[in-house]
Amino acid sequence: MIFENYLKNGKVVKGSVDIQKARALMKMSDNSTATIHAMKINEVNASIVLTISYESLRELLEAMCLREGFKVYSHEAYTAYLKMKNEIELAEKFDRFRKLRNGVNYYGKSVSKEVSQKAVQEISRLNKKIKEKYLN
């Protein structure tokens, strides 16, 4: 779905720019990332680490949207938002992590230590890219 459709169906609402909330979300994302990097990922905590890492990425995307006055009520809308910004690779990777996280949160699936480690590394790289390009 394209981003405009999320606006039309109310899953994204255009409102006021909220720089203060965007900064708070950036701080939360940094805190989540620091927590993850302080942990040793193992088979027991791999799924939890993946969900925290995903949230750190989603929080940065929410901060991007808030800087443009968008309030997003659907994680899928972030994928459309990134595509609108011509960030196709980032959109595809975010959507892949969203599906992994949904599997954990909604369907009781688990991810392996290796999958979690790779996700954390990739999400850290994506977070850095977003901060450098959009959140300075």
Image (cartoon, rainbow, N blue to C red):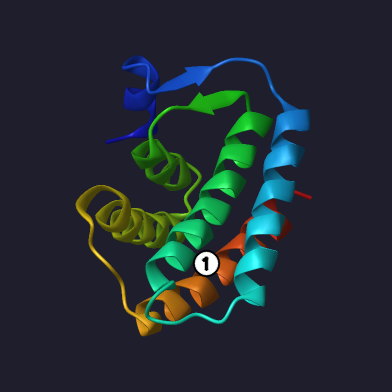
Residue 61: which quarter of the image? Answer: top right
Image coords of residue 52 (percent x, y): 51, 58
Residue at coordinates 66% horizontally, 16% vertically from top-left? 16
Image coords of residue 38 (percent x, y): 67, 75
Residue in the foreground of this view, choosing between 119 and 92:
119
Q: Which residue of the protein is positioned furthest toward the front in this rendering?
A: 44
Residue in the foreground of this view, choosing between 97 and 1:
97
The amino acid type found where label 1 is placed reads: Ile
Residue in the foreground of this view, choosing between 40 and 116:
40
Numbered circles on residues, count: 1
Does 103 sit above or below residue 22? below
Residue at coordinates 41% horizontally, 54% vertically from top-left? 91
Image coords of residue 68 (percent x, y): 63, 29
The residue carrying mark 1 is 123
Residue at coordinates 60% horizontally, 76% vertically from top-left? 39
Residue at coordinates 56% horizontally, 64% vertically from top-left? 126
**Does dot 1 land on a helix, a strand or a loop?**
helix
Residue in the foreground of this view, choosing between 24 and 91:
24
Quadrant showing the N terminus:
top left
Mark 1 nearby-residue class (10 Å; few <14, some 14–19, many ≥20): many
Image coords of residue 45 (percent x, y): 44, 72
